[in-house]
Amino acid sequence: MPFEDGHFPDNLGAVVQRTVLTGQEPPRIVIHEEDNDWLIGDGVNDPNLDGASVVVCISHIADADPSVAELATLPIGYIAERDEPHLPWTITVHEWADE
């Protein structure tokens, strides 16, 4: 478990797509990268476009969507995905497409 109490620390930063941060789209992808970074995306828009993603406290997303808060136990190197917010997360080993 990455965190002692199974909860994200209040000051933990994550790279989050603006569409998720603003509530325009739900979080559909949560990645706990090999270097211990956290990424949260909407799964439909390109997170790599200029200005598409920002660094914010992950607690902002977890507070807005309690199912994201449950992913604080996601191991390093794994990804949680879902098609829609009412569906359960599918957790698998994460690999970038170009690896």
Image: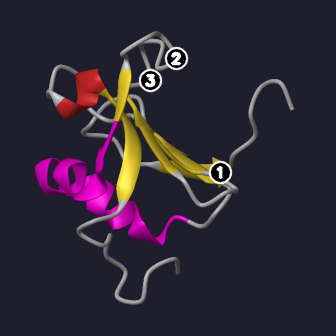
Dot 1 falls on a residue whose secondary structure is strand
Q: Does the magenta stretch include residue 77?
A: no
Q: Nearer the viewer, mark 3 or mark 1?
A: 3
Q: Please provide percent x and percent y for residue 10.
A: 23, 68
SS for callout 3:
loop
Q: Mark 1 points at which residue?
A: 92
Q: What residue type is labelled 3?
A: Gly
Residue 99, quarter of picture: top right
How many neighbours does mark 3 have within 10 angstroms: few (below 14), some (14-19), or many (20 or more)?
A: some
User: What residue is disc 3 on?
Assistant: 43
Give the magenta-colored segment's residue range.
55-74
Please say whether residue 58 is one of the residues in the magenta stretch: yes
- Residue at the image point whose x is 22% and y is 48% from the top: 61
The residue type indicated by label 2 comes to: Asn
Q: Name the residue under label 2.
A: 48
Instruction: Specify which label sits upstream in the sequence, 3 or 1.
Output: 3
Question: In the displayed structure, does residue 25 sit left or right of residue 82?
Answer: left
